[in-house]
Image (cartoon, rainbow, N blue to C red):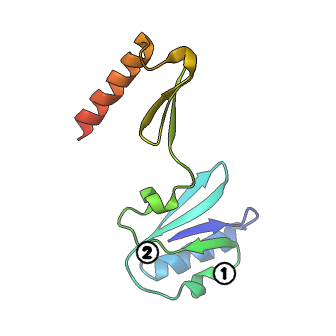
Amino acid sequence: MIIQLQPDISSKQKETLIDKVNGIGYKTTEVKTQLGDYLIGIGKKDFDIRKIGQLDGIRDIHIVSDEYKLVSKKWKAKPTSVDLGDGVFIKDEKWRSSPAHAPSSPRSKSAKSSITALKTASG
């Protein structure tokens, strides 16, 4: 489960929330991002989400049923884009570059070779 915390959640409210989530048999992990603070609950027990969602200090709550909770494509807000610098990007597994750095340029070929090697090595 992913719980988005209110920005003004008190220490007591957070402690109560963690105790409740742990009490249903879920392991908790706090995650801080530039957009907000979250509490991640990992477990397999069924429970009534309303019992957690109604607690003070919660902005939003979601149940995640995927095996790898935090890397599911379901949670992807927008396509991945990797900036290699000098106007060279990899986006949506496609090779893109600015006109000044066409895919045939030596720098682009070198970067593309490195990425291909990484993909091959990782399987």
Q: Residue at x 52, y 16 (%)?
A: 101
Which quadrant of the view contains residue 53?
A: bottom right
Answer left or right for 116 relative to 24: left
Number of marks in the rendered image: 2
Specify whether residue 86 is in view.
no
Q: Where is residue 106 in the image (x, y as percent from the top left)?
A: 41, 11
From this view, report whether residue 30 is shown above or below residue 24. above
Q: What element carries label 1?
A: loop
Answer left or right for 76 relative to 25: right
Q: How crowded is mark 1: few (under 14 residues within 10 Å), some or many (20 or more)?
A: some
Q: Position of residue 102 (x, y in %)?
A: 49, 18
Q: Mark 1 points at which residue?
A: 55
Answer left or right for 80 relative to 16: left
Q: Which of 90 and 33 is in front in this view?
A: 90
Q: Mark 2 points at which residue?
A: 26
Q: Which mark is residue 120?
A: none
Q: Is mark 2 on a helix, strand or loop?
A: loop
From this view, report whether residue 110 is shown above or below residue 81. above
Give the amino acid type for the residue marked by disc 2 in the picture.
Tyr
Q: Nearer the viewer, residue 47 or 29?
A: 47
